[in-house]
Amino acid sequence: MADISPLFGSIVPSQKQQLLDTNFLSFNGGSGAGDSDTFAQQYLPEIYEQEVERYGNRTLSGFLRMVGAEMPMTSDQVIWSEQNRLHIAYDDCTNDGANAITIPLQAGVNNVISVNSTVVLIDKLGAELKAVVTGSDIGTVGVGAVVTVAPYTAANTSSLAGTGVKMFVYGSEYDKGSSTPNYSAANTSGYVSVDPSFTQFSNSPIIIRSKYVVSGSDTAQIGWVEVATEDGTGGYLWYLKAESETRLRFEDYLEMSVVEGEKAAAGSAAETANFKGTQGLFAAIKDRGNVEAGYNAAANALGEFDNILRNLDTQGAIEENMLFLNRETALGFDDMLAGISSGSDGGTAYGLFENSEDMALNLGFSGFRRGSYDFYKTDWKYLNDASTRGAIDNGAGGYGVSAIDGVLIPAGTSTVYDQVLGSNIRRPFLHVRYRASQTDDRRMKSWLTGSVGGAYTSDLDAMEVNFLSERCLCVQGANNFVLFTK
């Protein structure tokens, strides 16, 4: 203490905040433990009040707000039905070269090609024949159905490949005065009615919970830090600073859980432990949509991208689509688009944003048009963030990237049959359903328990901030979605 001047005993405290030589402490250096500078560092630190935002905006949510909607429901399960194709084709048929075509049948699939139907037969090399059906049976699963045809321009079907033949009906031809035969068990070559059909899908919500706890003693300690949070608020907070971050993290979980969600498979460890899971965006596209593996926009240029468009032509052909991409894939698209002149592709397009480029750019989108499709491209922070899918250890002392590079999502709405309403309704292709009733809204619940901070629900000397939600994602018309993977 010899370095402190004046020495203890000669310091006279002032009754007011006055700058006097009798209440002034002088710290004269030193560097070791117990030295006067240690005393100064412990009791008189220089503190920056404002928190440094070294990771920028850390939240990951916002994706679903761009592309979907949220709607309440009252049940443990949401069920919807989607229309099947109006026309029916059979792929991978076998041709014996003598006018007999065998259709492979799977469970739930029937042969609906009847006698007198006119069909087109196309093999994998592009060779084709048009023919009229002279015989057709129902067939059985695993064995198939045999359809006998009479080609219009050849004596037999020997000009077609023996396997991989596609067959579809384009009309029919009957004699004068004929009648349409009815199918019966005894008449296996008769007419088979083609009834409209639909495919039913369902998903179940999961309950997501989190909690923030602070003891009563800690809430009594005074300490303020000036903060700015991702939700737009700012000011001086202390112990509730951690609560606000818990809330932000929970809001991210609400979106991440329906993007990454997975249903528990029969016999899985999760099912055995009574966890059911929920089908998220990625799982739904892998199950019912289109997966583009190994896509490299920069290297493959327009050729591979045009193949994606050809596939979209075979599906719903939704005109406007949104691309949410990681950094690598987004840059690849930029390189690809750099080689497209505005004269050849119709230029950029912003129809989804009232044809306003400023509106699109403010939302982080850039638009372009290819063929009859408009695309709006933006970065998806979730695929770039190092704490999620943005940095994966590649096992070689560096970092690779996630197996998912991006996703193509159709814009607009789809028409589906709602089992509860009993009618056709229009819904966004991608939307969240959450549990709610007149007495309880479980979209995003938050409540206090304990005996601190205004809550008096128990004798626990702490404040508990509880968060809860119950929700699931509906991916309708998944055949129009594309998942880009490694």
Image (cartoon, helix red, strand yellow):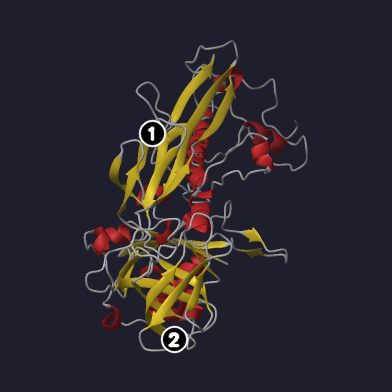
Label 1, secondary structure: give it: strand
- Tell me: 228 left or right of 263: left
Residue bearing the label numbered 2: 127
Q: Quadrant where the N terminus lies?
A: top right
Query: Toward which corner of the image does residue 308 lie, by quadrant?
Result: bottom left
Pinpoint residue 163: horizontal percent, then vertical percent.
54, 78
Residue closest to the eye, 435 or 379: 435
Give the amino acid type for the residue marked by disc 1 in the picture: Met
- Tell me: 124 left or right of 176: right
Instruction: Determine the residue positioned at 48% across, 85% down.
Output: 160
Which mark is in front, 2 or 1?
Answer: 2
Residue closest to the eye, 212 or 232: 212
- Residue 73 is marked as 1
Pinpoint residue 121: horizontal percent, then vertical percent.
42, 78
Residue 467 vertical placement versus 13 (above, below) = below
Residue closest to the eye, 114 or 225: 114
Instruction: Determine the residue positioned at 39% across, 68% down.
Output: 312
Label 2, secondary structure: give it: loop
Q: Quadrant where the C terminus lies?
A: bottom right
Res. 410 in view: yes
Asked if labels 1 and 2 touch by Cβ distance under 8 angstroms, the answer is no
Q: CA distance from mark 2 to mark 1?
A: 52 Å
Q: Count neighbours of disc 2 (C-alpha within 10 A) and say few if under 14, some if 14 to 19, many if 20 or more.
A: few
- Label located before the other in sequence (2 or 1): 1
Pinpoint residue 406: horizontal percent, then vertical percent.
48, 62
Residue 155 vertical placement versus 109 (above, below) = below
- Tell me: 409 left or right of 286: left
Residue 435 vertical placement versus 292 (above, below) = above
Name of the residue lying farthest toward the right: 33
Give the amino acid type for the residue marked by disc 2 in the picture: Ala
Pinpoint residue 386: horizontal percent, then vertical percent.
58, 55
- Residue 275 is marked as none
